[in-house]
């Protein structure tokens, strides 16, 4: 794999760290800024809001710019947002800074996925995307726990300064490792980029992301009470178990990239089926601590097997606007986060117990599989009618490598 992918992975590591670390710092932030834990929880939502707004907007506005330049600019915005978070004088300022921090998230992964696939041959496209996402999954193993400990001992502001430093390292790596990519004079403008969203296959692909990863977040959002109240783990053990989730996610991400280069849809179907099975069996896994730990690893693995196939499928359905569609897929991941957490919360509030979010997640995984199969049927019907299939709609291993602008 090209060394340039390391630069994308470093940026993904920083983004993954800042996205998830706030969850572990909520008590510290609430105490320092004299607010409540629920109010501090809105800082998590503020970041997600920034992702949803920034992903399609920044990708569309930068469509005709050189992609290395775009990646550098996005990481500069990332550094600024986290530095503003570190020096925020009040809760309202921190809320605004978290929105700014989230703005470049989706566009970075979207443009980064296009860059990554352009650096390799057609038989390695999914693996190249998985190498970029490797930074995100490793952040859950190393970055988030380390940043949380730093915040608890040195103050939460030190955490965001450290994340800003990671952003600076990513900028240096992008400059040093990613080749210059001049703008393509034939690149689609904002109007053509937006026109990609008029197609049903693209919406089905995005819907698969929302529902499929919503299944993960329905359960993962409430993994701590499941492990402590049902499986009987201590609060101190949860950090180790969440690191195990990151291990599973990393393994699943790498396997998903390798398998998707052979069969994109087969890997997607298999991942969603495995996720359904893991979530459906979660209540049984929680009956013993050893099996609960295994379930956490399997949950991360099954979910992230689908990450690279979903990203690549959306890019293939984009009809000439892969950067915007790929960025929009990151917004879809965050909608999955919010929607899945809400559905899991509804299940608990209805009195079905702490394991009910996992069962609800299994239902969402089945629905995600329905979306994926529906997208495949739409493609087959188009083929049967003799509608020409654009290059982006072919399986990953059939795509021809194209020079990046």
Image (cartoon, rainbow, N blue to C red):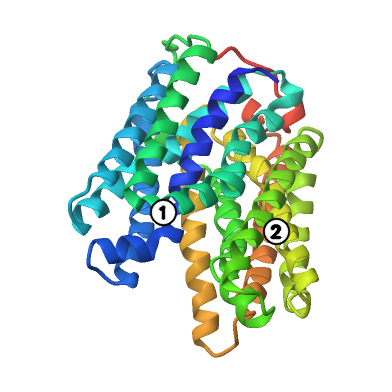
Q: Looking at the image, how many numbered discs can be counted on the residues?
A: 2
Q: Answer yes or no: is residue 190 visible.
A: no
Q: Position of residue 242 (x, y in %)?
A: 62, 59
Residue indicated by mark 1: 153
Q: Do the numbered discs 2 and 1 sit on residues whose CB atoms are within 8 Å?
A: no
Q: Residue shown at 33%/55% (left/top)? A: 46
What residue sits 24% from the left and 50% below the top?
Answer: 96
In the image, residue 234 above or below residue 119: below
Q: How far apart are marks 2 and 1 (CA)?
A: 44 Å
Q: Nearer the viewer, residue 336 or 87?
A: 87
Q: Residue furthest bottom?
A: 351
Horizontal and vertical percent position of residue 91: 22, 58
| Quadrant of residue 192 within the rendered picture | top left
Say which label, 2 or 1, has the lower sequence index.
1
Q: Which of marks 2 and 1 is in front?
A: 1
Q: Where is the N terminus found, in terms of image quarters?
A: top right
Name the residue nearer the viewer: 372 or 154.
154
Which quadrant holds residue 22? bottom left
Q: What residue appears at the point 70 percent right and 65 percent down from the top-left corner?
A: 366
User: Residue 157 placed where, x, y %?
Assistant: 32, 48
Q: Is mark 2 on a helix, strand or loop?
A: helix
* Residue depicted at x 53% and y 38%: 13
Q: Name the residue under label 2.
A: 369
Give left or right: position of 94 versus 213.
left
Answer few, some or many: residues within 10 Å of disc 1's Cα (few below 14, many 20 plus, some between 14 and 19): few
- Which of the labelled discs sits on residue 12, or is there none? none
Percent coordinates x, y for residue 133 in the rendering: 60, 38
Please say whether residue 311 is visible from this viewpoint: yes
Examine the rendered structure and indicate whether residue 149 appears above or below residue 100: below
């Amino acid at each position: 794999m090209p060394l340039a992918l390391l630069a994308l992975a470093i940026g993904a590591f920083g983004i993954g760290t800042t996205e998830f670390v706030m969850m572990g710092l909520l008590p510290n932030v609430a105490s320092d800024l004299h607010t409540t834990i629920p109010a501090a929880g809105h800082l998590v939502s503020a970041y997600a809001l920034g992702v949803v707004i920034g992903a399609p907007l920044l990708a569309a506005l930068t469509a005709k710019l050189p992609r290395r330049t775009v990646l550098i600019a996005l990481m500069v915005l990332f550094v600024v947002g986290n530095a503003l978070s570190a020096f925020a004088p009040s809760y309202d300022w921190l809320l605004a800074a978290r929105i700014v921090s989230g703005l470049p998230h989706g566009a970075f992964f979207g443009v980064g996925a296009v860059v990554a696939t352009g650096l390799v041959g057609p038989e390695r496209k999914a693996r190249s995307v998985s190498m970029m996402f490797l930074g995100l999954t490793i952040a859950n193993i190393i970055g988030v726990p380390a940043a949380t400990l730093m915040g608890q001992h040195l103050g939460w502001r030190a955490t965001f300064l450290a994340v800003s430093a990671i952003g600076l390292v990513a900028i240096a790596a992008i400059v040093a490792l990613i080749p210059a990519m001049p703008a393509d004079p034939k690149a689609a403008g904002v109007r053509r980029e937006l026109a990609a969203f008029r197609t049903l296959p693209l919406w089905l692909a995005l819907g698969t992301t929302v529902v499929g990863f919503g299944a993960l977040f329905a359960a993962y959002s409430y993994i701590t009470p499941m492990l402590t109240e049902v499986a009987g783990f201590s609060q101190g053990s949860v950090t180790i178990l969440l690191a195990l989730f990151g291990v599973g996610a990393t393994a699943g991400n790498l396997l998903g990239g390798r398998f998707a280069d052979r069969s994109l849809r087969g890997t997607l179907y298999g991942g969603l089926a495995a996720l359904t099975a893991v979530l459906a069996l979660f209540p049984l896994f929680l009956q013993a601590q050893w099996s609960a730990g295994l379930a956490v690893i399997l949950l991360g693995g099954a979910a992230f097997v689908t990450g690279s196939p979903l990203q690549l499928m959306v890019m293939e359905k984009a009809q000439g606007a892969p950067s915007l569609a790929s960025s929009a897929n990151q917004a879809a991941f965050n909608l999955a986060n919010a929607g899945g957490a809400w559905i899991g919360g509804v299940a608990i509030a209805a009195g079905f117990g702490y394991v009910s979010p996992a069962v609800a997640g299994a239902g969402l995984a089945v629905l995600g599989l329905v979306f994926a199969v529906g997208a495949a049927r739409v493609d087959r019907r188009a083929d049967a009618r003799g509608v020409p299939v654009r290059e982006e709609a072919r399986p990953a291993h059939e795509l021809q490598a194209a020079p990046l602008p």
